[in-house]
């Protein structure tokens, strides 16, 4: 059986800063082995740690113990309870107690206090089922993406080579959760395989991000999303110098990237990927509109869609985005399949969301859809047009908020006398947009 | 505690509606002690970011998540308004 190392850093290199305390790779391994030895049972591990170093240790511990890590789409007790109903032998590890969870929770703090240094790097079976990533479904039905250790190991080396910050030890701050693929690949796995020291926090507001970065030596880098970055770029106070800024999960406009390069003296790199394939292309929005596919990947057209494949993936992945590929292999993203939307890194099916709307007592007809883009860099929310003579917009909002994730709450939500359905019952997009523009004044 | 908005709460409610494009809500619809985020107003963490930016521009006050009172601060219009007043 083929084995691959848990990490490729030297044991005396700095892998994490936890609340300002330096953790070497050797100490990280000792902590992980300590936690691995203390974990009861033999089922999968649900890793809900919020502190990035605690998350990283719990993931490494599961790998050392040969156990898969389950990564739920969010930390809501209902989501985790659903997952545990399907996988009742799982072990929940969380550094902060989650209230209202009907399952024992293991606190990793004893292992995190271990100060000893390991003198060898654990070898992990290449075909170990390492992680099961659950991507958010619109109405609760999550899809599961599996990652073998070989895939995580190889993709980390590929990421480091394609867009990593380079040979100088770089301090990294991330605003994305470690449980999400973008956060997992960059803020957890990159420090295992590239000269990167991760800051254990997860700053949220612009003032938090500036404070976290200012405390670190250069070179320093920020892993984030367009939403956090727009907030940072518009912050009225002076910003902090950052060497590299990485963005993913939604399109980053050239204007926003330019503003960040200007205000933070940073080089801004945007990364494209999906949960199934991981990161697979990059571009620098200030200087180019086209994406550069990672060398390890190849792209094939299948009908109107594109499929990516790479040696480290268990199977080829059909991309949900529409691509325009040039003869030199670089490509543009030209939109998504119409039913699938991605808001703030969460995926949803418009058909599922519309069904949740129609399930509300008193709703006669209705539709949730994505209005035309305004292109101002804000998160574009969904809109709803609803026929419900007995209900108010507030009634419908209240009922919807119990059924769908807040990210997908339509706003505006407008009551209309009827929808412009064709004789076939279908709702042509152009009629819908015309009605929407009539009942909703343009924003801003 | 009153369910009526004070003048400063009303001003903050107007900022919330405007900065988050909550065009089907009116400022007076935001009840001072009703849960602001994650409840029926449909506001999520992205809105918290937008709102923090609008607050920093309007009031010159920086909101931070590392503040232990953070959860309480964002609980409702009244708590958020009181927090902003305390920082000014």
Image (cartoon, coloured by chain):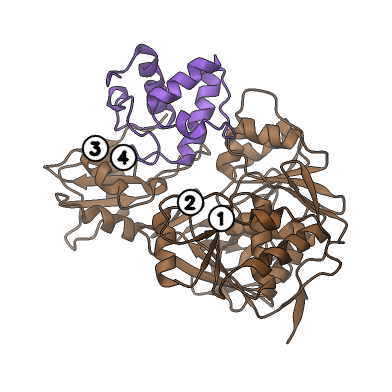
Contact between marks 4 and 3 (CB within 8 A): the answer is yes
- Local SS, label 1: loop
Q: Give left or right: position of B25 versus A27.
A: left
Q: Where residue B62 appears, x then y in whole percent?
A: 58, 24
Q: Are marks 1 and 3 on the same chain?
A: yes
Residue at image mark 3: A394
In space, the residues marked 2 and 1 are separated at their CA atoms by 8 Å
Residue at image mark 2: A98
User: Which tag, 1 or 3, sits closer to the chain's start?
Assistant: 1
In space, the residues marked 1 and 3 are separated at their CA atoms by 36 Å
Contact between marks 2 and 1 (CB within 8 A): the answer is yes
Residue at the left extreme? Answer: A390
- Local SS, label 3: helix
Please tell me how crowded label 3 is: few (under 14), some (14-19), or many (20+) other residues with Cα within 10 Å. Answer: some
Disc number for residue B40: 4
Q: Colour of chain A?
A: brown
Between A48 and A341, which is closer to the camera in this rendering?
Answer: A48
């Amino acid at each position: 059986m083929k084995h691959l190392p848990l990490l490729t850093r030297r044991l005396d290199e700095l892998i994490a800063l936890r609340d300002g305390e330096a953790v070497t790779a050797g100490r990280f391994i000792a902590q992980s082995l300590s936690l691995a030895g203390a974990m009861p049972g033999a089922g999968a591990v649900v890793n809900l740690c919020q502190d990035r170093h605690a998350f990283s240790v719990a993931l490494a511990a599961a790998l050392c113990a040969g156990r898969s890590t389950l990564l739920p789409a969010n930390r809501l007790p209902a989501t985790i309870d659903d997952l545990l109903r399907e996988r009742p032998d799982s072990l929940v590890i969380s550094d902060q107690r989650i209230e209202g969870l009907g399952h024992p929770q293991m606190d990793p703090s004893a292992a995190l206090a271990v100060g000893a240094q390991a003198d060898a790097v654990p070898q992990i079976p290449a075909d170990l089922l390492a992680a099961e990533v659950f991507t958010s479904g619109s109405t609760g039905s999550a899809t599961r993406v599996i990652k073998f250790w070989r895939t995580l190991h190889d993709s980390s080396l590929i990421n480091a080579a394609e867009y990593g910050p380079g040979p100088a030890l770089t301090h990294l701050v991330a605003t994305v959760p470690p449980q999400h693929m973008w956060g997992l690949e960059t803020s957890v796995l990159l420090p295992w395989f590239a000269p990167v020291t991760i800051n254990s926090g997860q700053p949220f507001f612009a003032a938090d991000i500036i404070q976290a970065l200012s405390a670190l030596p250069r070179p320093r880098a920020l892993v984030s999303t367009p939403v956090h970055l727009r907030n940072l770029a518009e912050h009225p106070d002076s910003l902090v110098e950052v060497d590299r800024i990485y963005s993913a999960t939604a399109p980053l406009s050239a204007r926003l990237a330019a503003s960040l390069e200007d205000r933070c003296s940073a080089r801004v790199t945007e990364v494209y990927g999906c949960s199934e394939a991981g990161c697979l292309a990059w571009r620098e929005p200030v200087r180019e509109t086209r994406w550069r596919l990672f060398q390890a990947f190849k792209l094939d057209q299948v009908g109107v869609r594109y499929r990516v494949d790479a040696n480290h993936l268990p199977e080829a992945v059909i991309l949900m985005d529409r691509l325009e590929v040039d003869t030199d292999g670089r490509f543009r993203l030209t939109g998504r399949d119409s039913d699938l939307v991605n808001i703030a890194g969460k995926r949803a099916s418009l058909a599922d969301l519309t069904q949740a709307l129609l399930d509300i007592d008193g709703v006669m007809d209705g539709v949730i859809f994505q209005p035309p883009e305004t292109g101002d860099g804000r998160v574009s929310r969904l809109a709803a047009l609803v026929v419900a003579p007995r209900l108010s917009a507030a009634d419908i909002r209240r009922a919807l908020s119990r059924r769908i994730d807040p990210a997908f709450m339509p706003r505006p939500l407008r009551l209309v006398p009827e929808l412009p359905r064709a004789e076939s019952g279908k709702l042509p997009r152009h009629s819908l947009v015309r009605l929407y523009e009539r009942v909703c004044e343009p924003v801003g | 505690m009153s369910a009526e908005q004070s003048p400063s709460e009303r001003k903050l409610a107007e900022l919330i509606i405007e900065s988050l494009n909550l065009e089907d809500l009116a400022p007076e619809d935001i009840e001072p002690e009703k849960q602001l985020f994650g409840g029926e107003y449909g506001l999520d963490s992205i809105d918290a970011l937008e709102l923090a930016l609008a607050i920093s521009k309007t009031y010159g006050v920086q909101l931070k998540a590392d503040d232990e009172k953070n959860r309480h601060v964002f609980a409702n219009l009244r708590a958020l308004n009181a927090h902003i007043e305390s920082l000014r």
